[in-house]
Image: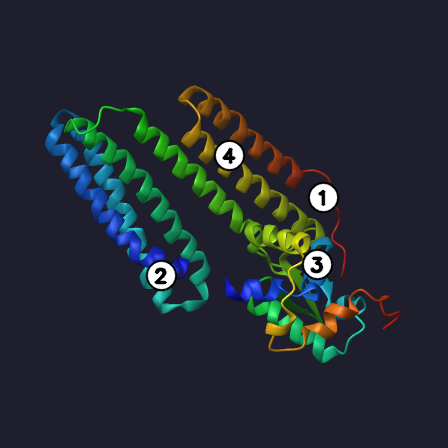
Amino acid sequence: MNRVFKALADPGRRRVLQLLRKRPMSAGELAEHFPVSKPTMSAHFTVLQEAGLIDAEKNGRTIIYRLRMSVLEDALLGFADSLGWDMKNTEADNPAQLSTETSRTPRKGN
Amino acid sequence: MSLRTITNDLAPGLLALTAALAIGNWWLRPDRASAWAAALIVIGCMGLVWFRVSRASAKDGARGKREDGIRAAIVFAALMLLVSLGDRLAIASGASSSPDFGMRATMAIAGAFLAFAGNAIPKVLTPLGNLGCDPARDQAVRRFAGWTWVLAGAAVCVAWLALPIAPAQTVTFILLPAAMVLTGVQAILPRTRRKSI
């Protein structure tokens, strides 16, 4: 459960989950919404996967990410969004980069 | 402590306790021997399933998730039997005179189980290659079904804990068929053709 809280503590990762709520997406499609480097995105996908919130499946040459959240985790995501959980400083990686950049204009093209 | 640890540790103890209660009931109420014998047979079958599932999961770790679900179901079923048999034993021995307690507790546990099972519905994913419909729609249906069963189960659980028997029965008979119809309709109605992602 700690991993779930850690994953949900970052606004950028929550944005990834919100995008996946609409439909499964490839890594490229998700990356278009975040003007950050691929390794940074990859690190966030890893955190979400380790928490069991998303599932990655290889489809040809692309990796498709799908939501894999229980109802409780879905509700926690809603709470986290409404309460604005943000624990940037406790992260091992650098989510601040993703968190702050999610509010900017999405990157065009890919 | 993980769910797997809890179910692994709880199930044998619960089943043993339930069997002891069935034997106790048989001792105090021999006129209903067939009912207690049936309960003992059910408990034996549950024990056998738990043993086989535990052995299979020890051999093959990849199937662990499905087996965790079976073990959790056994724990919930054992809890329901335990409460029911415990209540019968308390009444037969004169320790309790409330015939409602067993029914209330059993139905509350059943509601909790529905909520627990519903919570896991969106977690179960079909490989993309095996999906017969749009993956977005499959995901939406699973999320809808999960939320529906969690809310219905929680409402049934609370109704049996808080309301008088008659309204609790009404709530159950309205909510559970409604949840079934809602999830069924959501799953059957407009199935869009599969799109490539």
**Mark 3 belongs to which amino acid?**
Leu
**Secondary element at tag 2:** helix
The residue tagged with tag 4: helix, strand or loop?
helix
Residue drawn at 30 percent across, 58 percent down: B9
The crowd level at tag 4 (other Cα within 10 Å; few <14, some 14-19, many 20+) is many
Which residue is label 2 attached to?
A: B5
Q: Chain of mark 3?
A: A
- The answer to whether residue A76 is left or right of residue B196 is left
Earlier in the chain: of badge 4 and badge 1, it is 4
Q: Which mark is residue B155?
A: 4
Q: CA distance from mark 4 to mark 1?
A: 30 Å
Of marks 2 and 4, which one's residue comes earlier in the chain?
2
Q: CA distance from mark 4 to mark 3?
A: 29 Å
Which chain contains the residue that carries disc 2? B
Q: What's the residue type where badge 1 is placed? A: Arg
Residue B177 rendering spot, x and y as whole percentages: 54, 29
B28 left or right of B59 in image: left
Residue under circle 3?
A: A20
